[in-house]
Structure formats: structure tokens, C-alpha cells
Image (cartoon, helix red, strand yellow):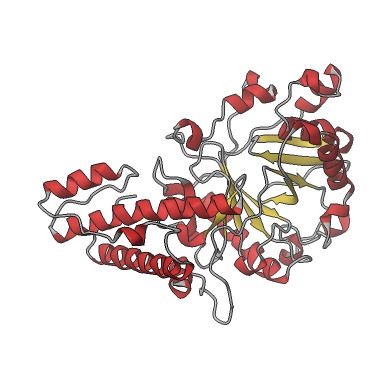
Amino acid sequence: MKLQARQAAGLAAKAGEVLAAARPGSVNQYQHHICVQLPRPADHMTSSAAAAAPGAWWPPLIEKEQAVVEVFAAIAQHAELFDGKVKVTAIEELGRSGPPPGTVNLCAWPASLRFDSLPVDKIGLAVALAVTESSIAQLPYKAREYKAVTAHMAPMPNLALLVCCHAARDTRCGKLGPPLAATLQRLVQQRGLDQEPPSLSASANDPAAASDSQPSSRSSGASPSTALPRVQVFGTSHIGGHKYAGNVLCYGAEHPCDGDWFGGVNSGNAEAFMEAILGIELGVDGGAEDPALRPYWRGRLGLTKEEQLELWEQARNKLAIVLLVLYDASRCGGPRIKAVPTCMVLLHSAAEQGGGVEEVDDAALEQGSGSEEAGSQGDDELERLLDERWSKLRQLGQRPER
């Protein structure tokens, strides 16, 4: 099954590379992710492609950089106002110059806040706004300090793709990350998705209002805008998961994959990955549930490893029903059936075509029953069945519309 997953994800794109298939539940739990773009040192301003790669100048430990130290200090200062751990990394935005000396660009998820050219001495309040749900009155800052920080707020892209490129920390990420990031950026530009988002509305200077205006599609049922999304590619410092390189993090408040971390992406399969990200069905629970993205899915920001595995298994069981019904309908000459999460629609459509639903042993769909060995065998059998049905649907030209 691991070999099948690697093949499905296109992980063998480059001969000689030994890569691991993305493993669900391999993301450590973090409630927030704060990214800091540091000014590129003058001695690293070069036209050399290698030196210009995102993060090429980063030291092995970006945690020692003064601006990053300030972020950690702010997190410690306000620790009593929020729950959970905070992931902090450095980033470099492809296609745009970095901040001037003495400032940073700071992005925070899931708050979907961005500050451009933020003075280092103002980082504390920006971090507090990003990780706490407290009102300004509860924070130890004055009104003029608040105004000085919010003046640096900038629009966020609809979708941010963060690629691990930290060569000084991890050789594999340094080898696979930069070309992957460059490929994703090229694909974004070719599709015209790199244009600047609209200007911030008046309410965007109020973090609470900005947060309220960008609910997660998973929690609210909101769907992405019908307009072309604005997509931005970043290089990020080490995020963990060396053996799953290339690693791509996906953030976007209204995108189904908001918070999803993916592995096994490289310049050879980047276009298929991008098409899957942009074409994911509305209502699908991110990469865990989308068949084209499951081979890459590692986990999700905010979830424990156990919750990630539970989500993975629930999505697999749902897909088992969907794909079996689609396969049954295809054998009866039925019309192409759109793959939506509502399995009852699919069951009804298949019945109308005169085909019965293929029975599946309940034991194969139930997780955690019986011995650990029996459960593992059931998992393998179910994955084999899903792979077989999906492959035949492709051959029959009955792959669900995307």
C-alpha cells in the first residue's frame, strides 16, 4: 500500500531519490502558525539563482534572529490569554521583495492577519492580536500603539502555499524545496492568480472584524468565491517531516484545505497537486477527503495526531461508499455521477440505474474493532479495494467530475 501511495503521489519523479509517502497524523499539534519575513542581508542580494532561492541565506537556527526572538517573547508574555502551541517559522515571499532593514513582514494563521514593513519593536502587539481572542482593553498596550501597528496591516492572499526550503537546516528540503516553490510560483503566474488582493476594507483594520469576515468554510459552510483566488507562494524555514519532503502547507480562511499540511510534493508532480488544490470540490473536508490530495495529506493545523488519524479514517470510510456506488453505476452504463459528500444522493442515483450497491463487509469499514492485527488487515483490504475501484473508474472514463 505504501508503494501504491508513492506512485499515486508521483513521488518517484526523480530517479535515485528515496522518499517516504506522506503519512497521516505526522503533523505536531499547533494552534497557531506565525511566519516572519526577515530583511535579506545586503551580502545576499545577488543575481545567482542558487543564492536567490527562498531561504538560501537563513542560518540553521532562525530562532536566534532578533525578530524571531521578539515573536517568542511576545508569545511567552501573552501565554495566559490563549491555549495551545504556536509554530514560528521564517518565510520568504516569491515574486516580491522583502521588508526594509529594521522591519519584518509578519503573517499569522488561522487569524489570517498580515503586517508589512512592521518595525521590530512593534512585533509584540502584532503577535498578541494574532494569537489571542482578547479585546484591546485586555492587552497591555495603549491606543496609539494599536494604531501604529494596525497601520501596517496588509491584505492576505486567498490561498497561501508555504514550501519548506531550509537548506541550512535540512539538506533534503534544501534540494527539493526551492525548485518546488519556483514551479508552484510559475503555475500561479501562468493562471493569473498572482495579482494583488483588493485593498483592505475599512473594517479590516479591526482584527476582530477581519476575523469575523473570514470564517472557515469547514465551520460555516461558506464556499470559496467564484472569482479567481489570489494565490501566494512562500518559502518557509524548517517545519518538520524531513522524510516527507517536499512539504507544502496550505492556508486560506475560505479554502477547504485551510490548515492542511502536505508531503511528497516535488517539481515533477507540482502541477497535478496545484490542479487538485484549485479544483477541490466544495464541501469536501480538505486533503483528507479529496481522492487526488489524500496521497499527499499529512495532517492539519490545530488537530492532535489522534484527531488527524480519526479524520483520515472517517474520510476514507465516506469515500469507500462513494467510490463503490460510482463503480456500481458505471458497470450499469449509468451517467457520470458528480462526487459530492452526500452519499445518499449517490445511492439514489445508482438505484435509478438498476444496479445494486455492492456489499462491503462491515468489519472492513469499522475501525478499531477486534485485534490490532485484524484491524490492520481490514485497513489494508479497504485501501486495496478503494485503489482498485478508483483505477477502474478511471479506465471506464467514469471518474467523478471535478
Question: Which of these two is toward me, 45 or 247?
Answer: 247
Query: Would residue 334 be seen by someone viewing this image from the given angle?
Result: yes
40 horizontally vs 277: left or right: right
How far from the left and from the top, in percent, is residue 70?
87, 42
Residue at screen point 74% across, 21% down = 135
How far from the left and from the top, in percent, is residue 127?
78, 35
Query: Would residue 398 be seen by someone viewing this image from the given angle?
Result: no
Q: Is residue 257 above or below residue 248?
A: above
Residue at screen point 77% across, 31% down = 81
Quadrant of the image occupied by residue 34: top right
Instruction: List the single residue furthest toward the front.
Output: 370
Instruction: List the single residue furthest toward the bottom.
Output: 16
How far from the left and from the top, in percent, is residue 305?
60, 54
Quadrant occupied by the N terminus = bottom left
Tally of numbered tags: 0
53 horizontally vs 310: left or right: right
345 horizontally vs 382: left or right: left
How far from the left and from the top, in percent, is residue 281?
39, 45
Residue at screen point 45% across, 66% down = 371
Question: Which of these two is toward me, 87 or 173?
Answer: 87
